[in-house]
Image (tube, rainbow, N blue to C red):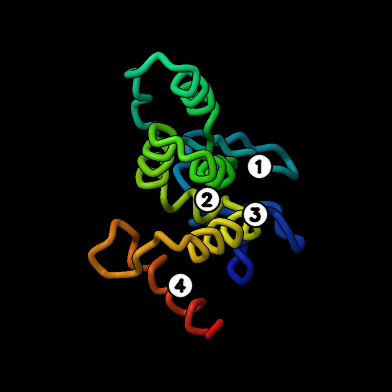
Amino acid sequence: TNNSTNIMGHEGRKWQPSPRRVPGVCRAVSVSIAKEHTVLLIAQERPEIPTSGNTLEDLAARTVAEHVDLFNIIPITITAERLHSKMLQQFCRDFIRLNLEAVLTLGRKSDFDVYLREQLLDRSLSLDRDAAIHPLVLDILMAEREAKN
C-alpha cells in the first residue's frame, strides 16, 4: 500500500518494501501477488450446523446453512427472519458473532439497511437494553425510530 491511500500498487508505486495493514482485509490466510494485482484468500469461522430435526424445514435450513458465506449472510439472515426459521436464525446469529468484523466490512450497505428497517418495523421487537440485540444495533434502531416520530 502507499502511505496516503492504503491501496496496493497504485499511483505509480509498484513495490512496497514493508507490509502494511490494508483497511477492509479481514482474516487473510493466503496471498498471491503478481506484477500488477494481488489476490487474498479470506477465511471465515463457521458455527456447527444443528443436526436435530428431520422436517423438510430443518433439512432446507441445514442446506442453506451449508452455503452461507461472508457475502450472503445478511440476505440469508433476512430470509430466515421472514420465514421464522429458528434453526437458521440461530445459525446466522452465531455466524455473524464469529465473523462480525468481516461481515461488517464485506456486507452490502443496502442489505444492512433492509435488515435494520425490518427490525425497526417489527412490532414485537422490544427496544430495551436487556434484549438480545447488540447495543450498537439498538442505538441505530432507537435513532431511526426517534427520527420518524
**Residue 23 image position (x, y, % from top left):** 53, 59
Tell me if mark 1 has few (under 14), some (14-19) or many (20+) residues whose alpha carbon lies within 10 angstroms of its own. few
- State left or right for residue 117 relative to residue 128: right
Residues at circles 1 and 3 in contact by the CB criterion of under 8 Å: yes
Dot label at residue 4? none
Amino acid, disc 4: Ile
Mark 2 crowd level (few <14, some 14–19, many ≥20, 10 Å Cα): some
Query: Which label was assigned to residue 140?
Result: 4
What is the count of numbered marks? Answer: 4
State the quadrant of the N terminus: bottom right
Give the spatial CA distance, label 4 vs label 3: 34 Å
> Is residue 40 left or right of 10 when viewed as pictured?
left
Residue contact at pointers 4 and 3, CB within 8 angstroms:
no
Point 49% across, 17% down: residue: 56
3D distance between C-alphas at marks 1 and 4: 36 Å
Q: Nearer the viewer, residue 95 or 89?
A: 89
Disc 1 on helix, strand or loop?
strand
Closer to us: mark 4 or mark 3?
4
Give the secondary structure at mark 3: loop
Q: Nearer the viewer, mark 1 or mark 4?
A: 4
- Residue that numbered label 1 is attached to: 38
Mark 1–mark 4 CB contact (< 8 Å): no
Q: Amino acid at mark 2?
A: Val
Mark before the other along the chain sequence, 1 or 2: 2
Give the residue displayed 76% in from the left and 61% down from the top: 12
**Nearer the observer, disc 1 or disc 2?**
2
Residue position marked by numbered label 3 in the rendering: 8
